[in-house]
Amino acid sequence: MNEIPQEGSPRVSVGPLTVRPWLVVSTLSWREFIRFFRQPNRVVGAIGTPLLFWLLFGAGLHQSFQVATDGPSFREYFFPGTLVLILMFTAIFSSVSIIEDRREGFLQSVLVAPIPPWSIVLGKILGATLIAWFQVALCLVLVLTLDIELSWGNVLCMLGVLLLGALLMTSMGFAMAWNMESIQGFHAVMNLVLMPMWLLSGAFFPVPGLAAHVVFSQQLLHWVMRCNPLTYVVAPLHELLVGSVASGRIWVPSLGTSLAVTLLFLLAAFTLACKVSRRRTRGDLL
Amino acid sequence: MSGQPVIEVLDLNFRYGSRVALRDVAFQVEPGEVFAFLGPNGSGKTTLFRLLSTLVPLQHGTARVLGDCLAEKPDAIRRRLGIVFQSPSLDRKLTVAENLRCQAALYGLGGRELAVRQREVLLQLGLEARISDRVETLSGGLQRRVDLARSLMHRPELLLLDEPSTGLDPGARSDFWNYLRQLQGEYGLTVVMTTHLLSEGDRADRIGILHEGNLVALDQPEALRRELGGDQVTITCSNPVQLKEQLETRCGVSVHLMDGQLRVPPLENESLWDLLQGEFQQQVESMTWGKPTLEDVFIHKTGQQFQSSSTSGEES
């Protein structure tokens, strides 16, 4: 048993503490970084799988896929989709960590701290977003392997779009994961919601246009993809990387529309995340 | 704050749907005391902890913590509360120092202030040498101590603990209590805890015994034991059910059957003594005398035995 040190300031009679929400945000974000790099399998999973998809699908579908006669190859077309998949995988891992935080007990002390709920949400989301963003920024180097001339301006714009996309996906992930009690449950949601969202975002194949002769299934696909928030993240990336592929057969939202819709969805997802974080789940009360 | 109760609760009721978890609970906790809520599993003590720690909102009744109304000013209370949960609220992937940094940030502490307080709590709890160790590499007892250090980072005036000894071996449990007493003695910290271990109830200054959501006793452990009078007698016999009936019928006393043994009140009743020495002597295999325990108090107050599942970890 150690003796209490005699030095130091007296312990009782402390003035009221000042809550500093931005310190909470920065510290929780910093924690996300530390955790991420201490779990190497997360790094491999988040970057490795999408890149493998890109290489395999790029090679496999190279001959059979053509957006337009002089349009991009599949490897070029699929590249923005791969970047968005990296964002999504990182967002998923980050959302899973909310369930872990609750199960392992860390979340308890956060929930009883005198801090506004938005600071918890933003801390968690910002940490995951920056991790995802740095990863895609690194992967952008692979553009050099493509037969594309990309200006620095476009690179910066792509990084901007990717940042918004990362914020959107981590916010959505947070809102979905908050009430989940098990990681298995979240995987089910991931397979049912997040993966189809990615597949139907124009990442894998373009959004079909609404020409007069288009069959019903294509019309349905058009509207489903048009309502998908990720479509407005993937479209500007395509445009910045390989130029517009819009035609009668292919629908592409304008850059302005994409930006506005992404911001709106982001605002909605963040608000929802803040709202659900006020709820006490069964896991908090076990 | 001195003189005023640290916690003042009146008419507290809480339900989970139709299930009543707390019923008309009222008590006060005085500054600088170590107070334990003792009860078997499902007695309502964790619900009470959740209410006092602001994890769940008040449904009915009034509660003042550190002079502030729990329903109206939960944030003001949170700033002055240190909370230790049943499972350590630590990030196992982070080091001890990193965990303390996270906790400090939640209470607005950073920079130099963080460094000063981190050093203070690490010294207090003898953790200086483990500052760079990841929590996942520490033993259960050490993790619990780090968790206590975490809860002290913002220098709380009241420390709430929910079954803090869960999962600790007797040595680590004893160490943990020494640290609590040290904090209480040196800084006048008020400590309120829940426990299902009778031995922990004995170590507290005062205890509140909870049973099925009711606060059935509230006093110093010694005073509660004194209420029962003299020594308690435990009887081992071949047919305890039959002997229980016979003793109750013949002597008009209340005899408790526990784990195949009979617990009888102090042998001030001469006819009871005579019967055990005479007529029933053949049935009795052994009789042991002992001071009343908190288990006897619990039986006396509730008419039921303290859950055997709760006590099984007692001597482990």
Image: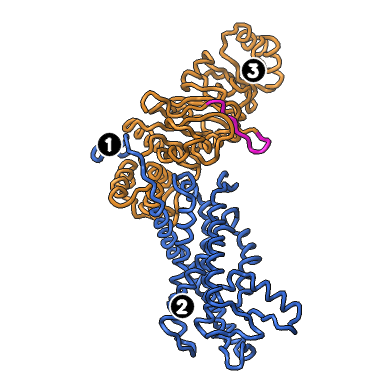
Q: At 32% from the left edge and 41% from the top edge, which residue is drawn?
A: B124
Q: Which SS class for mark 3? A: loop
Residue displayed at 65% across by 23% down: B257
* Residue A92 appears in the figure: no
Q: Which residue is mark 2?
A: A139
Amino acid type, residue under disc 1 in the picture:
Pro
Segment tinted magenta in the rendering: B10-19
Contact, CB < 8 Å: mark 1 with mark 3? no
Q: Are marks 3 and 2 on the same chain?
A: no
Crowding at dot 2, Cα within 10 Å, few <14 / some 14-19 / many 20+, comes out as some
- Image quarter hosting the C terminus of chain A: top right
- Determine the colour of chain A: blue
Q: Chain of mark 2?
A: A
Residue identified by numbered label 1: A10
Disc 3: host chain? B
Residue wearing tag 3: B255
Q: Is residue A82 above or below residue B86?
A: below
Q: Colour in which chain B is shown? A: orange
Q: Quadrant of the N terminus of chain A?
A: top left
- Residue furthest bottom in the image: A69
